[in-house]
Amino acid sequence: MFKSMFLKLAIVGILSLLVPAVLYAAGKHEGLNCTGCHGIHTAQGDIIFAVEPNRKVKNPRTNKPYTGVTALCLGCHETIENGGMGIIPVSASKSHPYGVVPNPKVANVPPSFLRSGELACVGCHDPHPSNPNYKYLRVDTEGGADMQKFCVVCHSSKADVEVTKIEVFSSMDERNASHESPLVEKPAKKSKSKKKKR
Ligand code: HEC
Ligand code: HEC
Ligand code: HEC
Ligand code: HEC
């Protein structure tokens, strides 16, 4: 128990060395610099994740550890005692449900929001730094002032919002990227030593 806690603390220590200090100051995923979440050649989980999935904290609905992307988010966003890193911990027992197969009477979740049939963290958040929305939510809630616009996606009978058109942010299809490729080819510079004629 103490050993594993020590290990986690050591991991947090290592992470904070790898990840620039600006991360904690900026308070956003930008500071994770892609490689804070994706271990390019040193992956610990699916989608080449840099952080080990949280196998400790249990889903109150199933009494089993979380799986998939949810377990990856919880590798950071749970308390250290519950197998995370204590970074803005999200408590399973006091939270909106996640890691659940939706009961259609309670929520009408668009299929593209589900992962393996479950509502994962990414059903509500798109965690990529390109997401401009408040708290990385998938819908623009005007800085949290218009939260109904987000809840209505799955709970439309509850919300007083005209559901004619709600834009959903997704970073998960490169074919939809809003910008052209910024690629510019740069020729190699001639090295000085080669220029000199001996
Ligand atoms: C490598 C660790 C790490 C992982 C993995 C991670 N996060 Fe974060 N997250 C952070 C850090 C660091 C912050 C900023 C902490 C602070 O402000 O103190 C943060 C902040 C956030 C915030 C708050 C953003 C804001 O604007 O206030 C949300 C929402 C969030 N994360 C969601 C997620 C979701 C969803 C996942 C999984 C897809 C995830 N995170 C995975 C480290 C992580
Ligand atoms: C907070 C953690 C986090 C950060 C930071 C992050 N990613 Fe991701 N990335 C994820 C998660 C979680 C998924 C899976 C999302 C899903 O299933 O909707 C993902 C998916 C991806 C995928 C798609 C994989 C597939 O199977 O289609 C690519 C590519 C990717 N990320 C690249 C990047 C790049 C490039 C950056 C930096 C600009 C970055 N990521 C930063 C968490 C992160
Ligand atoms: C049903 C949608 C939903 C799901 C599922 C969900 N979140 Fe959130 N999350 C939200 C909303 C909405 C907020 C903003 C709440 C507010 O501002 O009052 C938020 C806020 C956050 C924050 C910031 C909290 C703070 O104090 O700033 C973090 C971190 C976070 N979520 C991580 C996660 C992680 C990790 C998961 C999965 C384990 C997850 N969320 C699942 C909707 C969701
Ligand atoms: C992406 C879909 C989605 C969004 C967006 C969403 N929810 Fe949910 N919500 C669900 C699912 C799935 C459940 C669990 C249904 C079940 O019991 O199987 C749920 C359950 C709930 C419950 C019942 C909780 C319980 O313990 O029984 C409440 C209350 C709730 N949501 C409120 C909200 C609010 C408020 C928002 C906006 C801030 C929101 N939801 C946004 C999908 C969503």
Image (tube, grey):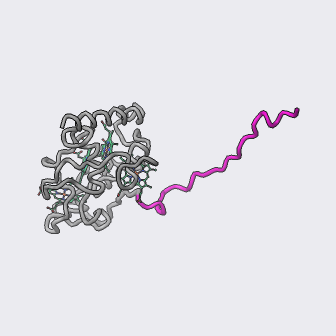
Q: Is residue 25 above or below residue 59?
A: above
Residue 94 in view of the camera: yes
Residue 149 in view of the camera: no
Residue depicted at x 46% and y 48%: 41
Residue depicted at x 40% and y 38%: 31
As drawn, the residue found furthest toward the front would be 3
Q: Is residue 112 left or right of residue 184?
A: left
Q: Find the magenta span and give its range.
A: 172-198
Q: Is residue 125 above or below residue 4?
A: below
Residue depicted at x 25% and y 56%: 67
Choose between 17 and 5: the one closer to the eye. Answer: 5
Instruction: From the top left corner, tell me how far across and down residue 34 is, in percent.
Output: 43, 45
- Image quadrant assignment for residue 167: bottom left
For the C terminus, the quadrant is: top right
Instruction: From the top left corner, tell me how far across and down residue 90 is, in percent.
Output: 21, 44
Residue 179 part of the magenta-drawn span? yes
